[in-house]
Image (cartoon, helix red, strand yellow):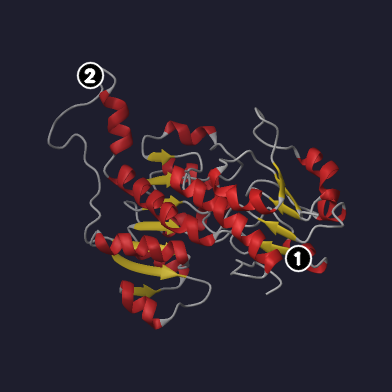
Amino acid sequence: MKKKVLITYNMLRPGYADLMEKYDVTFPPEGRESFTYDEVLDMISEYDALQSMFNFPVDKKLMDAAPKLKIISNYAVGYDNIDVSYATQKGIQVTNTPDPVTEPTADQAMGLLLALCRRISELDRRLRIPGAVKVELLANLGLSLYGKTIGIIGMGRIGQALARRAKAAGMHIVYHNRHRVDSAIEEKYQAVYLPLDELLSVSDVVSLNAPYNEETYHLIGKRELSLMKEQAVLINTARGPLVDEQALVEALRDKKIWGAGLDVFEFGDYPLPALLEFDNVVMTPHTGTQTIDVRHEMAAYVSRNIIHFFEGNGPVSKVNLK
């Protein structure tokens, strides 16, 4: 009998071709975006594998209802939606998708940075309103990137991909990480390790690329924002709760920093309404990995994790049970 795989979200099918050929795969019905938590809870007892999305909670209750479940293949690099500790206790393998998200997320960070510093989004909006833009030498000043310092918080795969882009743009790189990276990586990007407070005080750009956990909750709050330069910008393509969003609003209102580029928000899919007031804030709705190519590759990646796990014939991106 074929193993059964439950997919929580109605994703593009091509990346699932190999999985669908080998196993009995269930997607949400046509016309439905996703299964609800309660629907998955009712169905999960029959399934050997669950392919969860980054925003779908996989908790103790769900796992207790899944006696056959052997693997949770998460469609994301982050896995804070899953109770990994409990999965480990129950012998359930948890996997993620680090490789496909690296380059597009770094693209997104660089795109937000350019749009913010050169005021691209703001001026595009204003040009559409008759008389809203003055075309004068000193009317639309932005910030240059060349020769400036970018402080990367989280020097993992995405942080290093961003460092490569920043280096190409002629920026100086400093970084903060839970553990200092290998000297070969520092040499490659000419990156200097700094304590967090020092990084905040010397950087012209602060980019958040760290995972979300108890230690990184509100990593950037009122105190940290006060350490930043008045002409510094904050970029967050990691997870929303890394930033105290109300403190960010206050810092922007008080002109403590120059601006912010956000792809993620503290309280879900949308920013605090106050952030919409600022022209010096560029926002996207968590689209860091939303390209056609990446969606196909992520689907193929979660599929390979499941296939390789069951068949033992290839690498599995394991979060636990190493």
Q: State the SS at label 2.
A: loop
Q: Residue at x 39, y 62 (%)?
A: 161
Q: State the SS at label 1.
A: helix
Location of the N terminus by quadrant is: bottom right
Left or right side of 294 for 121: left
Q: In the image, is residue 166 above or below residue 281? A: below
- Asked whether 137 or 97 is in front, the reply is 97
Q: In the image, is residue 168 above or below residue 111? A: below
Location of mark 1 (residue) = 85
Disc 2 to disc 1, C-alpha distance: 58 Å
**Upstream in sequence: badge 2 or badge 1:** 1
Residue 70 image point, x, y percent: 77, 61
Mark 2 closeness class: few <14, some 14–19, many ≥20 residues within 10 Å: few
- Asked whether 4 or 37 is in front, the reply is 4
Query: Label 2 is placed on what type of residue?
Result: Gly
- What label does residue 131 carry, if any? 2
Mark 1 closeness class: few <14, some 14–19, many ≥20 residues within 10 Å: few
- Asked whether 300 or 182 is in front, the reply is 300
